Image (cartoon, rainbow, N blue to C red):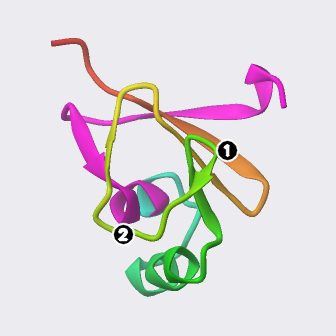
Amino acid sequence: MSNQDIQEIPIRDSMIRLGQLLKLASLVEDGVEAAELIKNGLVKVNGEIDDRRGRQLHNGDTVTVNGQTVQVVAPEA
């Protein structure tokens, strides 16, 4: 996968939780769908399956769902 395939998702703070990012990036329609995908092992964080909906994501972290990858872009401190 090339960097061109990765969509950057800007966030307001230095951290965002996995479930929130999935909604912000429009990878899911709601929190229920996010929870199901995460619980079923269909979400990868930095290339590894993660089943923690509350997982904290920071600048540079990548999340992949259904072949779509997004990258967290936090504001500079």
What x and y, as percent, mark residue 62? 54, 38
Mark 2 highlights which residue?
Answer: 53
Q: Is residue 40 left or right of residue 35?
A: right
Q: Where, by quadrant of the figure, is residue 28 drawn?
A: bottom right
14 part of magenta stretch: yes
Q: Position of residue 63 (x, y in %)?
A: 56, 47
In the rendered structure, the answer to whether residue 72 lies left or right of residue 12 reads right
**Disc 1 versus disc 2: distance between alpha carbons?**
17 Å
Q: Residue at x 32, y 57 (%)?
A: 55
Q: Residue furthest front?
A: 48
Three-letter amino acid code at disc 1? Thr
The x, y position of residue 67, in whole percent, is: 79, 55
Give me the residue at 38% from left, 58% from top: 18
N-terminal of the pair, mark 1 or mark 2, is 2
Residue on which the image places disc 1 = 69
Q: Is residue 58 left or right of residue 49?
A: left
| Relative image position of residue 69 (x, y in whole percent) | 67, 44
The magenta stretch is 1-22
Point 32% across, 36% down: residue:
11
Which residue is most to the top?
Answer: 76
Secondary structure found at label 1: strand
* Number of dots carrying numbers: 2
Provide the secondary structure element on which disc 2 rests: loop
* Residue 18 against residue 10 in the figure, above or below: below
